[in-house]
Amino acid sequence: MNTINENVLIEALETMLDQSWNGPIDCDHFAREKAAAALEFVRQKADPLADVRAKAEAGDAQAQYSLGYAYRFGDDVAKDAVEAVKWYRKAAEQGHAQAQFNLGTSYYFGNGVAKDLVEAVKWFRKAAEQGHAMAQTILGSAYSYGVWVKKDLTESEKWYRKAAEQEAGVTINK
C-alpha cells in the first residue's frame, strides 16, 4: 500500500485552498471548509506540537515548559535533552517554577547540559523560593548534609519546614 508523504499532502491542500479562493477551481463554501479542516488535521498529525511550539516561540512560559517536557520525555517528538534544556531555560528565566526545577535536575544529572552542581542548586533555589515543594525538600537535604552547599542546619530546617507546611497545608511551630 502506498503512503502519501504528509508534506506533499499539506502542500496539495494548501494549493487547493489558495486556488479555491483566488483561482480557477470552482469550489463551494462547504468544500473549502472541509478542505481547511482536512489541512488542519494533517498539520496536527505532521506536528502535534505546532500550536505549543508557536506559543513557545512567541514567549509563552507555560508553552516553553511544555515543549521542554515533550523533548525531555519524547512526547510527540524525538527525545532530545539539549532541546529540552533550551525550552526549560526559556521558561525558567521567566519564573516558571517547574521549569526551574527541571532545569536544576538537568544540571544535577548532566542531562542535556554539562553536570554542574552550582547551577543545579541555583535553579533549585529559584524554584524553592516560589514554593516548589520538591525543590524545598532538596535544598533542606542539601543543607542538612552539606551536599553541594555548606552544611547549615538552620537553613536546612527552613527549607524542610516550608516544604512540610506546603504539603500538609498547615503551619509547623517550633
Image (cartoon, rainbow, N blue to C red):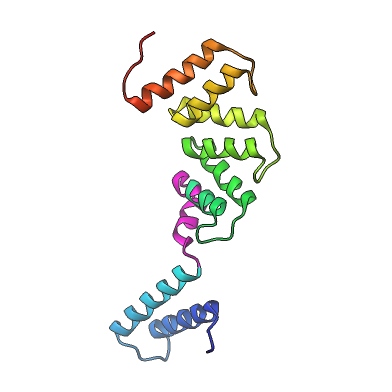
Res. 96 in view: no
Query: Residue 24: x, y in percent?
Result: 42, 91
Q: Is residue 153 above or below residue 95?
A: above
Q: Is residue 102 left or right of residue 116?
A: left
Give the residue displayed 43% in from the left and 18% down from the top: 161
Query: Residue 148: x, y in percent?
Result: 65, 24
Give the residue displayed 48% in from the left and 20% down from the top: 159
Q: Is residue 116 left or right of residue 164?
A: right
Magenta span: predominant SS is helix
User: Can residue 48 be found in the magenta stretch?
Assistant: yes
Q: Is residue 91 above or below residue 54?
A: above
The residue segment tinted magenta is 47-64
Q: Is residue 112 left or right of residue 22?
A: right
Q: Is residue 74 above or below residue 116?
A: below
In which quadrant will I find the C terminus?
A: top left
Relative depth, front residue between 108 and 83 = 108
| Residue placed furthest toward the right | 114
Query: Residue 76: x, y in percent?
Result: 50, 61
User: Can residue 172 be found in the magenta stretch?
Assistant: no
Give the residue displayed 44% in from the left and 59% down from the top: 51
Q: Quadrant of residue 132?
A: top left
Query: Residue 37: x, y in percent?
Result: 36, 75
Res. 135 in view: yes
